[in-house]
Amino acid sequence: MQDQVISQNGKKSPWLMFLLPSLLGVFLFMAPISYQDSLTIPIAILAKSVQALFDGMLPAMVTFVIALTGVASIATKLLKPKAVLESSFLSGLLNPSLPWFVVQQLGAIFVVMTYFGIGPEMIHHGDTGGLVLNDLLPVLFSVFLFAGLLLPLLLNFGLLEFVGALFTRVMRPLFNLPGRSAVNCIASWLGDGSVGVLMTSKQYESKIYTEREAAVIGTTFTAVSITFSLVVIAQVNLEHMFAPFYLTVCLAGLAAAVIVPRLPPLSWKKDRYIDGQPLEGDIEALPEGKTVIGFGLEQALEKASQVKSLRSMVAEGVKNAIDMIFGVLPVVMAIGTIALVIAENTPVFSLLGQPFIPFLELLRIPEAAAASETIVVGFADMFLPSILASGIESDLTRFVIAAMSVTQLIYMSEIGALLIGSKIPVKPWELFMIFILRTLVTLPVIAMMAHIFF
């Protein structure tokens, strides 16, 4: 089989072009490594090294980046420079549509107010804008820097084609998704959900995923990392329950991944590419007479042979990093701050949680009224439910709230804002509907497991 594939390509170099970058990408994005008493991946360690190197300076750097983006966008709208408008890359960053221009400017205003501590306190308070600027954005900046630069190792050298052929028989029947989406899930699970969003967005832009596939993967498989899950369970003082907790999270997440994409609004998404062309056939479907591994290698070597030069891959990585840092950080600052201001200063999320009281009582969850206040607030930030749950006496209820906050997945202080800021075709109201559906699907599973363990 190997000789056959080599002879088809006429030379052996595609093997090296496939194996070396792909193995390096797998190591950087997926290899679980113990670091500072927690399980993480090399790309996250690189990100943490940047945070340590620029300790205390990253909020200022992020403020400069977001403010510069805002000023440059205003200048582009007013002066209409030819060099920017004729470049699809620069135009996408600095000449957005009116709604995104407004969000971009809000991000710039909020970040300046927060950094200098000016204006209404509800904007720059440590639990609202201060949380986004000082705790979240430095992490995203560091992750985007390395993930953007190194993402071509996963995307451009044949790994996705090989994995797609191997996993299509699992991903298609269960989730109606390409086999290659398993890579996104693993990278998110072991590393960071933001990496999964970045990968999905780039593959949607490259016509690898359709509108439906990108929306489903972005809202379903950008799983919360193991490290993040440890932090959440520690917040509710149940660290000793981590193994049953993570088993519960996996089972509930699997149930949501099977059910939610088959319901509106995700089921309404079209199987068409970013340019409007419809999906024609399954590119990962196994041709007659081919073995899974043989076909996967054939596809991978063909992809690897298309790489013209490593310089072009470096240039693509730099563009990825710039696109995410300058394009997404302002959106996260704006939407994350607004969501947290609403959560901290209004009863909106508490009122939205009231209809869940009968549901929680039906599931025999103790302190159902207190638990209901934590359910919808997770849409603003994933940590808010476990913070609110710290005052609840029942271990079972705290366990349920912690697991629920992880499996809800879409929170506007990070993943939600990232999805909106990316090219993935989901609207804010759709994200809220998906959030509610995930809650309704996962809560019974979590409650059942909690009653088994407690």
Image (cartoon, helix red, strand yellow):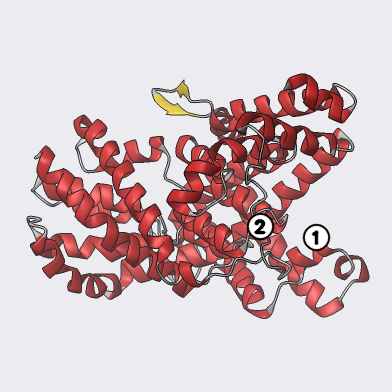
The structure residue drawn at horizontal position 20% and vertical position 30%, both measured from the top left corner, is 240
SS category of the residue bearing label 2: loop
Q: Horizontal and vertical percent for residue 405?
A: 31, 53
Foreground residue among 179 and 119: 179
* Label annotation for residue 89: 1
Residue 159 visible at all = yes
* Label annotation for residue 281: 2
Report which quarter residue 410 is drawn in.
Answer: bottom left
The structure residue drawn at horizontal position 69% and vertical position 56%, both measured from the top left corner, is 326
SS category of the residue bearing label 1: helix
Q: Is residue 25 left or right of residue 74?
A: left
Q: Residues within 10 Å of mark 2 (few under 14, many from 20)?
A: few
Q: Amino acid at mark 2?
A: Gly
Q: Is residue 314 left or right of residue 423?
A: right
The structure residue drawn at horizontal position 82% and vertical position 27%, both measured from the top left corner, is 14
Foreground residue among 213 and 80: 213
Q: Nearer the viewer, mark 2 or mark 1?
A: 2
Report which quarter residue 435 is drawn in.
Answer: bottom left
**CA–CA distance between discs 2 and 1?**
30 Å
Q: Horizontal and vertical percent for residue 408?
A: 35, 56
- Farthest residue toward the right? 82
Residue 234 visible at all = no
For the C terminus, give its image quadrant: top left
Q: Horizontal and vertical percent for residue 15?
A: 78, 24
